[in-house]
Amino acid sequence: ALQGGMLFPTESPSREVKDVSGLWSFRADLSPERNRGFEQHWYRSPLAQTGPVIDMPVPSSYNDITQDAKIRDFIGWVWYEKDVWVPARWIQDRGARIVLRVGSAHYYSVLWVNGVKVTEHEGGHLPFEADISGVLRQTSGNPCRITIAVNNTLTLETLPPGTIQYMNDRSRYPAGYFVQNTDFDFFNYAGIHRPVLLYTTPKAHIDDISVETTFSDNIDFFYFMYLFSLIFSSRTHTDPMSVKHCIVTSLTPRFVWQIRGKGFDWPLVVKDFNLMKWMGVNSFRTSHYPYAEEILQMADRHGIIINVCVCVFLRRSFGNVSLAHHLTVMEELVRRDKNHPSVVMWSVANEPASEMPPAGFYFKELVSHTKSLDSSRPVTYITDSNYARDQGAQYVDVICVNSYLSWYHDPGHTELISLQLNTQFDDWYDKYQKPIIQSEYGADAVAGLHSDPPMMFTEEYQTTVLQNYHNVFDQKRKEFVIGELIWNFADFMTAQTITRVVGNKKGIFTRQRQPKAGALLLRERYWRIANETG
Ligand code: GCB
């Protein structure tokens, strides 16, 4: 189990926070083995002394910052460095603890301060930190030099997993040529994605707290009511809009924008919350990885509920190594997010290969471990497996199903959605008698592309798919369907493949956050449901 807490750094009379984000020096290690930085100890001296450096903003993905496709598609170690001034009183005050904290960096990170290694961390979306008081007091250096090496390589042991494939056919590929294969559908943005902070606490300090939320209402027998009641009782600024009898109407914001990739960006976060409120959305799913804590804080304040996800696409790895790492990631996630009233359910995976035999044991362990970390919230994972072959649904509290009827199956045949979706829901419910959320559904639409009768990739086709799903939701939510989450809030970047036209276009907003016809359809629907259910 993890040692200690991971409280969000907040200023107080006894704690100071210094944000050292901004412009950092940067170099990608383009050497064939990608290991020159470690061989030549790039952390020992200023980075500019061991080779050329470029400016790199933090927080931001590095991929889209330059004009160089080698940087966009880089796989391996990149090196970041910044000189920062540590207030003299922090260093002099022996009762002060000085901590260096990285909100997140994708995927594997090593940290040095003045050439001394202070920590390393595996995992792309959760914070890590190191007490650097000792190093700062021993190495007299001020300004102090922070060096962070970040490696985005994904393997079968990482979450999300991936594989590195060497291309050995010398008639087609140069020596040493390799590619990163992944099974997930978003661009593998990399770099330092969330703020880098220095903060102090007194030596004797509170390291962790646990807030227990209680119910303020007689809400118990439906799961969706349970979901909502958590917010009701524990928010300090309660939104007067009553949501307790309504279904989860929702979407998946990605907080990924142009240029900065996955880099945390306040204007984007506030814009996306404004768009969600404009639409009447009452929840969202952090679909494929944990989002920044600032986003959870926004959700707490605005009364939007979240289902937090830890990882994606366990398509191939069901080994013991990945289970052990997966349990650790759940510990890090629950430690970080347990006190957010907006977090109403833990999701341990997205579209795993849950029909494979090892999946039964894997999900049994994963779900029970998560429940042992937090017994107050339901646990789920998102499945796209066949109900009859799925091995893990028996362990979850809510069944979350993704389906793309008339898209990946029966393309063009929206008239089949009603029959197939009814069958999908009845199959799952008859087998498990558990509440069901449609956790993804949708269709790609290139904004501005039109056709009537509708054709795939037009705005009309997207709205027709949504409308057909909604007709079924409206019947089934009287029974056991407790939520609908459209895929996706906004278009987003993916790897280059023949099925993606500069990214995934299933957004109801473009990447620039302009609405397609589907956004207006959903806006009308969500407000109508909110009004009907009071
Ligand atoms: C899914 C995945 C999501 C994809 C989506 C799609 O089921 O969870 O990552 O982007 O389908 O559009 O194919």
Image (cartoon, rainbow, N blue to C red):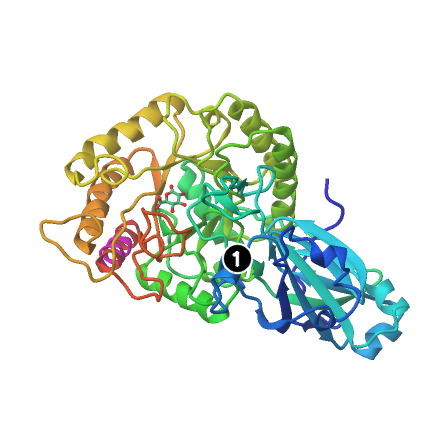
Residue located farthest toward the front when viewing the structure as drawn: 171
Crowd around label 1: few <14 · some 14–19 · many ≥20 (10 Å): many
Residue nearest the observer in this picture, 246 or 347: 347
Residue nearest the observer in this picture, 29 or 240: 29
Q: Is residue 240 left or right of residue 476?
A: right
Q: Position of residue 343 (x, y in %)?
A: 52, 49
- Give the residue pinned by disc 1: 296
Magenta stretch bounds: 520-527
**Secondary structure category for the residue under label 1:** helix
Prevailing secondary structure class for the magenta stretch in the rendered image:
helix
Residue nearest the observer in this picture, 528 or 289: 289
Residue nearest the observer in this picture, 234 or 78: 78
Q: Is residue 396 left or right of residue 334?
A: left
Whether the residue carrying mark 1 lies under 8 Å from ligand 1 is answered with no
Q: Is residue 129 left or right of residue 230?
A: right
Q: Position of residue 480 (x, y in %)?
A: 33, 33
Tell me, yes or no, if residue 262 can be seen here.
Answer: no
Tag 1: amino acid: Leu
Could you tell me which residue is drawn at 68 percent across and 57 percent down? 7
Could you tell me which residue is drawn at 49 percent across and 31 percent down? 396
Tell me, yes or no, if residue 429 can be seen here.
Answer: yes
Could you tell me which residue is drawn at 47 percent across and 36 percent down? 381
Q: Position of residue 264 (x, y in %)?
A: 53, 64
524 is higher (above) or lower (below) than 219: below
Which image quadrant shows ligand 1?
A: top left
